[in-house]
């Protein structure tokens, strides 16, 4: 796999993990609410996660993090 594809896969995995963590937080919160439930939690999560600004923020955060890790590893002296 090319390095560019590996970085793109890293970004996709980081974005998916972030969406999963947000889902768990919203779903558990919805289950604890008096008029909540699993379907209410899913609908709330889906409405939140499908917003372009939220998706953009998650992807941008993953891109910056991966870029920093790659940059930092490149600067590390070899032994």
Image: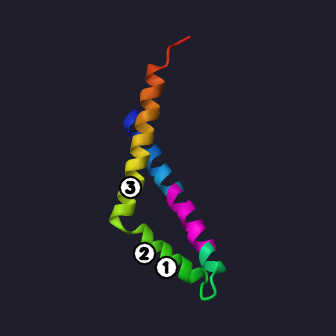
Residue ID for mark 2: 47
Q: Which residue is disc 3 drawn over?
A: 57
Specify the farthest residue to the top: 79
Q: Nearer the viewer, residue 5 or 15?
A: 15
**Element type where label 1 sits in the image:** helix
- Label 2 to label 3: alpha-carbon separation: 15 Å
Mark 1 and 2 residues: CB-CB less than 8 Å, in contact?
A: yes
Could you tell me which residue is drawn at 57 percent across and 60 percent down? 21
Q: In which image quadrant can residue 50 be found?
A: bottom left
Between discs 3 and 1, the one toward the N terminus:
1
Q: Secondary structure beneath disc 3?
A: helix
The residue that appears at 46% across and 54% down in the rendered structure is 15
| Residues shaded magenta | 18-28
> Which quadrant would the N terminus be assigned to in this image?
top left
Residue 44 in view: yes
Q: Looking at the image, is 16 positioned above or below residue 5?
A: below
| Residue topped by disc 1 | 43
């Amino acid at each position: 796999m090319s390095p560019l594809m590996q970085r793109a896969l890293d970004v996709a995995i980081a974005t998916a993990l972030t969406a999963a963590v947000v889902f768990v937080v919203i779903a558990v919160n919805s289950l604890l609410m008096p008029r909540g439930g699993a379907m209410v939690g899913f609908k709330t999560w889906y409405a939140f996660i499908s917003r372009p600004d939220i998706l953009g923020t998650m992807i941008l955060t993953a891109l910056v993090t991966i870029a920093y890790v790659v940059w930092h590893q490149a600067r590390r002296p070899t032994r």
